[in-house]
Image (cartoon, rainbow, N blue to C red):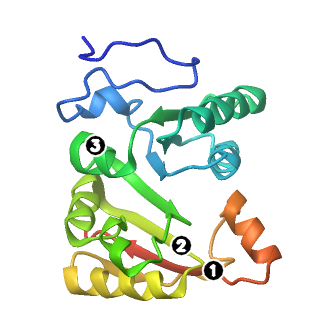
Amino acid sequence: MNTLPRPPISEAEYVPPHYFRRLETDEIRNGGRPLEIDLGCGDGSFLVELAGHHPERDFIGVERLLGRCRKVAKKIRRAGTANARIMRLDSKYVVEWLLPAASVSRIHLLCPDPWPKFKHRRRRLVQIPFLGAVKAALEPGGEFLFMTDHGEYFEEACGKIRESGLFAVEPWEEDSFFYPKTDFQIQWEAEGKSMNRIRCRKPI
């Protein structure tokens, strides 16, 4: 029973069976199919395109804002991507408190809010405790992929990743594998900005 019961906004929304305990693996994964999590999925373009390209995998986009979740749910339905769902919760909470251990094959964090003011930097998602929770949620050999146009945030995040010692850093060129562009990436590249990316793998 859900402690905060509410109907899903659509069949494309994943509502956890409980908000105040860690999920069981079989509550979020569909059998042995790989599961990927897109944190802060925006308008859902990246999520839907990736799910369409990989019908053998399952995808959950995490987004806090109701309006965005409704748009993503509509986009999923229109695309007919039955292997994609949207979850309306805070990304940090999902990773640190809900995801089961060793249950996710990839976690994507693309173009998050960089909180550029110095006094707000503690709000940035990439912190040592968050990275520890990411590693715990990933299955052995699973990947954490981080991308941002904000150079200073990228350098800080890379420093924390190195400091944590939790991951091996893998090469990630733009054409290394199929990886659609997010709505923010398209917008910022049109403005002449470049993207910084890092691909981290949990040791086997």
The numbered disc on residue 6 is none
Work out which quarter of the rendered image holds the N terminus and state it.
Answer: top left
Residue with the mark numbered 1? 195
Residue with the mark numbered 3? 99
Q: Position of residue 188 (x, y in %)?
A: 73, 73
Which residue appears at 63% of the width and 44% of the height?
Answer: 51
SS class, disc 1: loop
Q: How many marks?
A: 3
Residue with the mark numbered 2? 147
SS class, disc 3: loop
Q: Position of residue 160 (x, y in %)?
A: 28, 82
Disc 1 or disc 3, which is closer to the eye?
1
Q: Are marks 2 and 3 in contact (CB under 8 Å)?
A: no
Q: Nearer the viewer, residue 74 or 36?
A: 74
Q: Are marks 1 and 2 in contact (CB under 8 Å)?
A: yes
Disc with the residue nearer the chain's start (2 vs 3): 3
Distance (Cα) linking label 1 and label 2: 7 Å
Which residue appears at 30% of the width and 80% of the height?
Answer: 161
Left or right: 180 in relation to 19: right
Say if 138 sits above or below 14 in the image: below
Disc with the residue nearer the chain's start (1 vs 3): 3
Q: Residues within 10 Å of mark 2 (few under 14, many from 20)?
A: some
Distance (Cα) linking label 2 and label 3: 21 Å
